[in-house]
Structure formats: structure tokens, C-alpha cells
Amino acid sequence: MKDLLPSAIKNKEKRSEVHAKLKHQKKLEKKKKAKVREAAEKQALELGEEPPARPIPRTIENTRELDETVCKPDDEELFAGNDADEFSCILKEERTPKVLITTSRFHSSRGPAFIDELISVIPNAHYHKRGTYDLKKIVEYANNKDFTSIIVVHTNRREPDALLVIGLPSGPTAHFKLSKLVLRKDIKNHGNPTNHQPELVFNNFTTRLGHRIGRLIQSLFPQDPNFRGRRVVTFHNQRDFIFFRHHRYIFETKESKEPQSKGKGKKEEAKTQEKVITRLQECGPRFTLKLISLQHGTFDTKGGEYEWTHKPEMDTSRRRFFL
Amino acid sequence: MPRTTTVESSGCPPLRALTFDVLGLIKVVEARGGQNGDAAKVVERWGEPDASKCVLSASILDRESHPLIGIARKSGSVEIISAINGDLQVQIPDLCQPEDDSIVGVHLLQKHKSDSSSRSCALLASTTKGHVRMESVKLGETPAKSVRDPSPTVWNVCGSGNILCSKVSEDENHALFGGKGVEVNIWDLHKREKIWTAKSPPKDNLGIFTPTWFTCATFLSKDDNRKFVAGTNSHQVRLYDISAQRRPVISIDFRETAIKAVSEDNDGNTIYVGNGSGDLATFDIRTGKLLGCFIGKCAGSIRAIARHPELPVIASCGLDSYLRIWDVQSRQLLSAVYLKQHLTSVVFDSHFRIEAPAPQVETAVEEDCAEATPVKRKKEHRGTRKAKSKSSKRSKREED
């Protein structure tokens, strides 16, 4: 009877009973294990030994499929490729980025609000009305006006749902799905950003494709952050989703007082002890991007060549990531 | 439901392929074959990474002694190097101005002109603006000693539009050119005159005319210069027959992005088609029927497809930086090599033999027999049998 799986029992009442029992047992076992580990750690601490290494939990990220395209820090071809790519003149500060933001043909409600916030995030961004122009015409116009990138916010059912980032004049076109958009006013205790140039944080863009996407996004921002502004824009990649966050931070020095009961001899020390604490305030907006395709050259749906497109046959493993 | 088990492949046969990329590097990929499924890997890298030396086109003169490779660079020069060790043989600088014109195709001709010694070769290069230049080169021991033909023949193949593809027939008598705004046309290389031009297909039932934009083309068979296949930007693959009509005989739609590479099979009626979103398929061009797609994790545009002259293997490369080697019959991926840059071209060196092949192969076959007979597991059996037949075939060829 003990080996019987609860799912094999047909009577529901009995099944849930057995299941609950099993669950309870497991819980007890887990508690026991934790107790043993804690005891061992304590003992080791008392004896002055190194405590036993904590087991690392297996997550999807650290059991990721082996990927040979992950960039290595000593790859000279990678650096030569970086020097030759479309963004290098912006990232080397030879050109100041100038961004044109426009929309899909029809947009309303959260679309314009999102664009307002994007303009406050990206310095030197200009909103142009879409009108009835073709995107190819807009690319041409932006090239003539010395823009370095175009962002197109696509709206569906009055909700922004896609972002198109085009590098100019010849740069790639990235098509992202946009989800989980939270605007500034919906964030509790949000701050209002200043117009200092932000610092940038890019996390986990490891593969060659990720590296390229990272550089594409990086080229939207000026490369000389104004540290007085204490403004930071984060693009965090986790399992191929790119999370966007925008914060203000502050370092505050606080004098912490030692509790009095701990002996009066230390009183002088306690007064001088200063503690630096960091506080974060989110400025918004907050959204998540997922790459759908990366096109070589500017926007061209008919004759375009893709550097990378998502295909359904790539989704055969949960542990395979591309960025 | 996605397939979770991996299909057992028979392993990559011994072959040697050369790839060319956007940083001007040439990488030699070799597969050693063998029963334990040795994957192909990069064995040599020629050149230093330099974006101005981006390779636009390459062609190989595939022969037993002194195989040569012609490389067209973005800077407007053409280089001829040895396919064995990558030594520069001749450099032809300033074929065109890199600002407004670029080389689209370079072909090394073998039988051109009377002298067919291995120390000389002829070269045909065409540029975007339609300037075609044919010259013969006598190779010396060093690049400085090589002698170029003082009077190269230069002519123009189009008045307007951009040439995007060029191809020379197997017997080197005819060449075809096509491009954006240029209908495919065929030239006689000896008389240097246009002998045939295609006619654009009629307007469709909505009265819409698709502008001419050919992206790639290839002659269908080795001994017949009358049939050729061209791929267009409007995702069509067209078969033309000079002897029949000026409009396409068959026109096939393939997926939704522009066709970027077309390659013919040795049998003269199968073609391989690659497009801008990384789909690779094979067609029977007599009927226009899709024989099947090559399914792998091919994510980026396919720039070049090469068919191995002897082995049943094709190689594809493109913007996803992978060189992929496929089996023609089973359409399985045999090997994929990551080469870090966007690749522009791939060629096979068919005269590649692994060192000291005969004894190695013999022992391998014997071992294989010993292994295969007692254990009769279904899957393994099939795999080893295939490999065995291949290896025995190879040994036979080397005995010849």
C-alpha cells in the first residue's frame, strides 16, 4: 500500500487523504534535513572550521543548455567585430545619439502616456507624429535629419504591445514584444526623474546575439552619464526576457547609535559610527521586452534579411536561451 | 508536441570546407569522418580581422594540383590565394571604386584560353554597376613574380539597375547576370555578346506588376547551359529554359522572405533554396514540387549554399554565423560549426583526403564489423551500417 501513488486511487476522499499524508511527511522530512544542516553549521562555527558548503539550488538559469555562442572576454574576433559594427561610432562618442520616437498608425490612451515617459527616460528623444507615412519614408526622413535611431511603439487595442528599434543609417532592426507595462503614475511612491543623463546597467547579455542587442539598446543613450543626477536605467535579461527599470538612488550617511546596554566603555565609539545606506526610488515606467526578430539593415518586411528570427522549432527545450 | 529525442545521424563524412566572413577572415573547417562521429571543426584561420576586407564573393578552382581561391573584397580588390595553405598568389587592386561600386561575383575559370597549365588561371569579376572584367594571370612563386595580363577584357552588361548575381556555366562558355532592375541575361564569354534576355512575367490578376529583382541564380546542370534557375526578391524561384521561351517555365513561391541562395544538385533536376529568414528547402525543379525542408535551429538569413561534388552533402552558411552541413537524402543536420561572424560564402575543397587514409579505414571497418554483429540493437545497427558502407566506399575510391 505504501508504494501506491495517490493519483492511482479512484476514490477522491481517500486520494486526498493519502495525498495530504504524503505531503505532511515530506514537510517533516524537509524540516528535519534543515535542522541537521543547521546543527552541522553551528558545530563547525564553534569548532572554528569552515562550515559545510551550502548546496546550490538547481534553477533553469544555471542548468541552461550549453551554448557555444556565449562571448568570451579574450576573443579578438569579437572586439574586431564590435569595432566594425553599426553602433561603434555612437558607443565611442563620435556621434551623439538622437532618437526619433513615433507610433503605429492608430494609437490612443496608454500609448501617448508611454511615449511621454520614454522621452523622459531617453535624452535627446523627439516625438514625431506618425501621420500616414510609410515606415520606410520615416527611415529616409530620419536619415536626412541625422537621427541615430528610431523607436516605433506599436499599439493594439489601446495598449502598447510591441517595440521596434531601428538603428540608423544602416543598422539592424530589432522587433520586441512589449508586455507588463506599468506607467509611472501607477507605481507607488514613484519619483520624478531629472533631465540628467542616466547611467546604464546591462545584465546577462551573454551570447553573441545578446551582445548585439545590448549594444543596439545602449546606442539609444548618450555614453557620458551625469553622476550628479543619480539616475540609473537598467536592462536586465533573464531567460530571454529583458526587464526595463528606471530608478533614482541616493547614498545617505546615517549615524547609528550603539545600544546602551552593551557596556559603557564603548560609548565614544558608538557616537562616531556612521553607516552609509543606499535608497532606491523607482521612477518608471516598468516594462518587459522579448526579442521576436533581429533584421539586418533597416526596416524592410518584404526583402529583408534576418540575422535572427524566432522559430517554433527552437522551443524544444525550456533550458535553451538565445540572449 | 516537440520532438524530444534526437535522431541518430550517420556522422559527418570527411570533408574540407572554407568559409568567408564579414571581417575578411577565411576559416578552414575540416571533418575527419570516422565511426565515432567526429564533428567538423575549425582547423585554420587565414587573415587578420579587418572590416574593410569584408569578403563579398568567393570562388574555388577545385582541382588536384594547385587549387586556387578567388576572393572579392569590399575594398574593391580581388585576391587569388592557394586553397591549401592560404598563401597570397596574386592581388589585383582597385577593380572598382569601393564608394559607389562593389564586386558582386568573382569566378576563376580553368579552361579559358589555350594554356591550361596549373600555373595560370583566368578570372571573371563583375561589379554592381555591370562592369565585367576578364583577365588571365600567370602565377609565380611569390605574389611579386606573378604576371597579370596587360590587356584585360572589360565590357558592360547593363545600362541601368544593379547587378546582384552572376554565374559562369560549367564549360565556361556562358555567363549569366541578373539583379535589381535587370532581367537575367546570358552572355557568350568568347564573343562577349548578349545571346539571351529574360522577359518579366505578366501582371497578375490584380494588375500588379512586381518589379524585377533577382537575388541569386544558378545553371541547372553541368552539361546543359540552356536551363537555369533564378531566385527573386519577391520569394519566387523561377526556372528558365533558353530553348523554350523568354518567360519562366516554372515559377514557385517559397515562404515569405526573399530568396537569398540557390544551388543546383549534381543530378541536374534538384535544387536547394535558402531564404532571408533562414529556411532551407530542396525542390524537384522538373515538377516544381517541394521535396522537403532542412530543419534545424537555423535562425539567420542564408547567404550561400554549396553542394559537395562527390559526397551527398550540402553546406549552408549565413547571418547566423553557423556553417551547417546537411545530408542530402535524409535532410538531417550532420554538423554545425560556430564561426563567430556573419558568413558570406562557403566553398568545398573536394580533393581533401585525410592523411594516411588506407590503413586507418581498414581497421575501422574491421572494428565496426566486430561491434555490429554481436549487438543487434536496432538504432545503432542502422547507424553503423550506413557508416560502414560509406567508409568502404571511400576506401574503394582511394584504391582507385
Image (cartoon, helix red, strand yellow):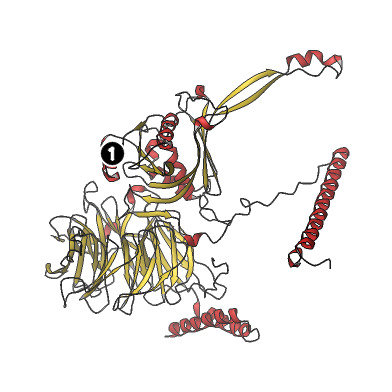
Q: Is residue A239 left or right of residue A292?
A: right
To which chain does the residue with label 1 belong? A
- Helix, strand or loop at label 1? It is loop
Residue sitting at 50 percent across and 31 percent down?
A184
User: Residue A291 placed where, x, y %?
Assistant: 46, 49
Residue sitting at 75 percent across and 14 percent down?
A271
Does residue B107 show up? yes
Q: Is residue B2 left or right of residue B195?
A: right
As rendered, which of B141 and B185 lies closer to the eye? B185
Residue topped by disc 1 = A131
Q: Amino acid at mark 1?
A: Gly
B371 is higher (above) or lower (below) than B258: below
As rendered, which of B121 and A277 lies closer to the eye? A277
Image quadrant for the N terminus of chain B? bottom right
User: Residue B134 placed where, x, y %?
Assistant: 19, 63
Q: Is residue A192 left or right of residue A54?
A: left
B211 is higher (above) or lower (below) than A32: below
User: Residue B77 placed where, x, y %?
Assistant: 26, 53
Classify mark 1: residues with Cα within 10 Å, few (<14), some (14-19) or many (20+). few
Residue sitting at 81 percent across and 43 percent down?
A51
Image quadrant for the C terminus of chain B? bottom left
User: Residue A29 placed where, x, y %?
Assistant: 83, 53
Does residue B84 show up? no
A252 is higher (above) or lower (below) than B41: above
Q: Is residue B86 left or right of residue B127?
A: right
